[in-house]
Image (spheres, coloured by chain):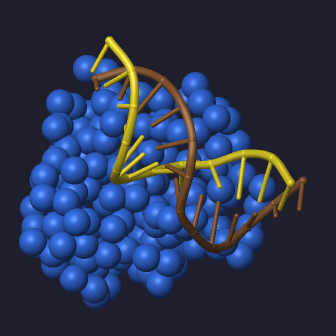
Chain colours: A blue, B brown, C yellow
Amino acid sequence: MLGATLLVDGVGGILVEVEAYAPDDPASHSFNGRTARNAAMFGPPGTLYVYRSYGIHWCANVVCCPEGVGAAVLLRAAEPTHGLDAMRTRRGVDDVLRLCAGPGRLSQALGITGEHDGAPLDRPSFDLHASPSGVDFVASPRVGVTRAADLPWRYSVRSSPFVSRPRPRA
DNA sequence: CAGTGGATGCTCT
DNA sequence: GAGCATCCACTGT
């Protein structure tokens, strides 16, 4: 996922920070099995899983495992490349470094909401372009999780200024 | 810069 | 009724 370009209605950028959530992972929404909320996590690869965070924000994940497994990758940050004006309007922020730096911010900038939960990414209005090979990345602990906090499953493009805070080491 | 607290809704106990 | 895979504004150095 790192280095891939994700666009929603032509607006988006290059993914520079993601987090993995596995089915046997106490921090994963799928840990206690399938429910109404997490059903999209059990869909086929390429399915979008969107949930509401802290009552306010939307957070977007991409299913990257076979159907029925219940695993997904949280999209945490992107480097804005397409539709900067639309993103600035949606975010109410001018600084390009803060448009997509964080899962709630990224979803807001790309216009992703609960209506997109369960949507397939290989169809309009989405565009997902594969990353170039050989992306240089760093692994670090996941942000904001209390269970399985030791797993270094937050992956960031090394030295990218577009990642969220707290900034990963090296 | 670091630390604190409020907003706010839904899921699961 | 607790607990969030968060963000922003505000405080004090």
Residue A66, placed above or below residue A116: above
Spot occupied by residue A107 in the image (x, y as percentages of width and height): 36, 66
Q: Is residue A110 visible?
A: yes
Residue A118, placed above or below residue A16: below
Q: Is residue A30 left or right of residue A105?
A: right
Q: How many marks?
A: 0
Residue furthest to the bottom:
A124
Q: Residue at x 12, y 58 (%)?
A: A94
Q: Residue at x 31, y 30 (%)?
A: A167
- The picture quadrant where one finds residue A89 is bottom left
Residue A25, placed above or below residue A41: above
Q: Nearer the viewer, residue A99 or A123?
A: A99
Q: Residue at x 20, y 44 (%)?
A: A162
Spot occupied by residue A132 in the image (x, y as percentages of width and height): 15, 51
Q: Nearer the viewer, residue A79 or A68?
A: A79
Spot occupied by residue A55 in the image (x, y as percentages of width and height): 57, 65
Residue A10, placed above or below residue A72: below
Q: Is residue A22 left or right of residue A36?
A: left
- The picture quadrant where one finds residue A32 is bottom right
Q: Nearer the viewer, residue A164 or A30?
A: A164
- The picture quadrant where one finds residue A93 is bottom left
Q: Is residue A64 visible?
A: no
Spot occupied by residue A91 in the image (x, y as percentages of width and height): 25, 66
Q: Residue at x 45, y 54 (%)?
A: A74
The C terminus of chain A: image quadrant: top left
